[in-house]
Amino acid sequence: MNLFQSNQSEFAWWVEINTAVPRCTYYFGPFDSEKEAQLYRSGYVEDLYQEEARDIIALVKQCQPDDLTIFHEKAEVQISSF
């Protein structure tokens, strides 16, 4: 993900949600404004909670995610198999 470019204002607004169970990062968007992303944030959190995700942290940020869903547990399994 490219978060630290000199002209970050070129990026759209996204809702980034991290969950502990499962260990994932989700990106929802893009949105035209921070306000629009904030309006939708609680709906995404509620949907993930209904799907039994837990320890949910939701942020609104300007970025350009490479992937919309990142499964952190899968990466740990691959590392431990070496």
Image (cartoon, helix red, strand yellow):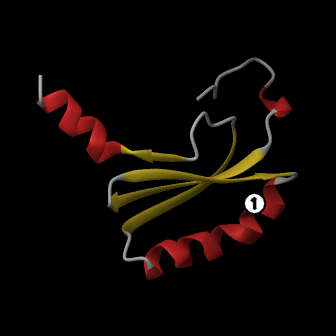
Q: Is residue 64 left or right of residue 1?
A: right
Q: Considering only vertical position in the picture, is 68 above or below 43?
A: above
Q: Considering only vertical position in the picture, is 55 above or below 33?
A: below
Q: Residues within 10 Å of mark 1 (few under 14, many from 20)?
A: many
Of the 4 image quadrants, the one containing the N terminus is top right
Under circle 1, the secondary element is helix
Of the 4 image quadrants, the one containing the C terminus is top left
Three-letter code for the amino acid on which mark 1 is drawn: Ala
Q: Position of residue 19 (x, y in %)?
A: 40, 59
Q: Considering only vertical position in the picture, is 19 above or below 6?
A: below
Name the residue furthest bottom. Answer: 50
Q: Position of residue 29 (x, y in %)?
A: 73, 54
Q: Residue at x 69, y 37 (%)?
A: 63
Q: Position of residue 14 (x, y in %)?
A: 70, 50
Q: Which residue is mark 1?
A: 37
Q: Residue at x 72, y 69 (%)?
A: 40
Q: Is residue 31 left or right of residue 52?
A: right
Q: Position of residue 42 (x, y in %)?
A: 62, 74
Q: Is residue 3 left or right of residue 8?
A: left
Count of residue discs: 1
Q: Residue at x 77, y 28 (%)?
A: 8
Q: Residue at x 83, y 32 (%)?
A: 9
